[in-house]
Image (cartoon, grey):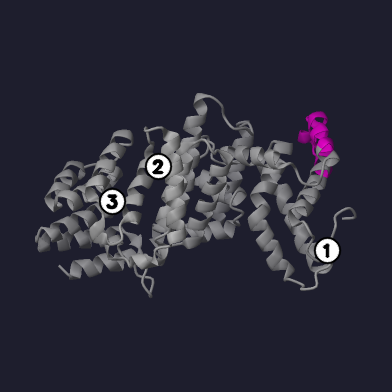
Amino acid sequence: MGSVTTAPDAHRPDPHRAVEAVWRIEAARLIAGLAGLVRDVGLAEELAQDALVAALEQWPAEGVPRNPGAWLMTVARRRAIDLVRRNERLRRNLAELGHRLEQAEGREERPEPDEIEDDLLRLVFTACHPALSMEARVALTLRVLGGLTTEEIARAFLVPEATVAQRVVRAKRALADKGVPFEVPGGGELAGRLAAVLEVIYLIFNEGYSATAGDDWLRPALCADALRLGRVLAGLMPGEPEVHGLVALMELHASRSAARVGPSGEPILLLEQDRARWDRLLVGRGLAALRRAEHLSGGAPGPYVLQAAIAACHARAAAAADTDWVRIAALYEDLAKLLRSPVVELNRAVALSMAYGPQAGLGLLDQIAGEPALRGYHLLPSVRGDLLFRLGRREEARAEFERAAALTRNTRERALLQDRAAAC
């Protein structure tokens, strides 16, 4: 690495930890920059991994370079040139690719900030392409944008590592086979593709915020990854209100994380949380993002902006009793008009019960109880049990809590529901 500057480091940080930290920060930019050159996300990730291996081999002996990101990019570009010379498939595009690489070699080691942002944005839209299944989009996004290993993704979603590896491999192969362009869609296609991108990020956040299965109710690392991806996207698309709406929603939800679990990891429901433990910095960031989203939406808020507005009602209430449930019920009604789904209606039933009494919520629950999407969804009997308990119908409430406990796959949530059943 003759032309790459290596700084002598008097403090001698652990090179392996440094590599890990740099990878977390730089992986997405590195892969995006390489994908912009080779137009193949899978190949870009392989090149980035090669550079990572080189760092693991060289940094312990030579020290951590002064600009680790530039070092990795330089190594990866050189590997790309070597690969192009060897690879028959890429040789067909040698003239075009070689021109791009020569241009890149002629510039500073690190691309211009605008160029990085453009490549990152293309990478986001490529990893979340509708041609891929939702599972594949999530795995690929966490891999190439979040910098997570297959092992980390598998641990987060409680699936075998081999399953995640297959999803990533198949996703990259599908993108290549289908000839998915490395670009941000234009015109009317952008809105649909952006919705898919936001859905992937929010799905990652939600899995961290209320784990579907396992022994932990929260997985903070997944929330942090989703929030970081959302903030990056907001920086790349500053004029999109729904992007800021999603960021606001995640910031406001994340602000409650410390108060959502007790000393033993047991769930603490929203109305019982110690609001002094809510992170006011995240609340402030969330409210600021919501104001930006509402300004950009021009009085016609989308689904994420509305959900963030609901979260803001909770954030502004100093105590649970101060919550403006009438306002929340009205926001859910607006949301249901935009995004009518059984889950939204379930949440609206809760809001109605808090604003106008449990019977109002129970009436709506009865209307949606037969929805196929709610069959086997533990929150339906959980909410129903709560409303019946508040109405004094304790035997029916107990049966609903027991049914909910039998349906959930999360150990902590099951224990909570069993406790509620026992209290009836």
**Residue 357 image offset from top left, x and y in percent:** 14, 52
Q: Which residue is mark 3?
A: 376
Front-lying residue, 201 or 43: 201
Q: How would you classify the magenta stretch by its main secondary structure?
A: helix
**Residue 168 image offset from top left, x and y in percent:** 58, 47
**Residue 206 image offset from top left, x and y in percent:** 42, 53
Earlier in the chain: of badge 3 and badge 2, it is 2
Q: What residue span does the magenta drawing correspond to?
A: 82-103
Q: Which residue is mark 2?
A: 304
Instruction: Please report contact status of discs 3 and 2: CB closer than 8 Å, yes or no.
Output: no
Write the residue at 42% across / 45% down: 290
Quarter of the picture containing the N terminus is: bottom right
Front-lying residue, 73 or 83: 73
Earlier in the chain: of badge 3 and badge 1, it is 1
Q: Is residue 115 above or below residue 58?
A: above
Q: Residue furthest top?
A: 187
Write the residue at 69% across / 36% down: 39
On the rendered structure, is 338 left or right of 284? left
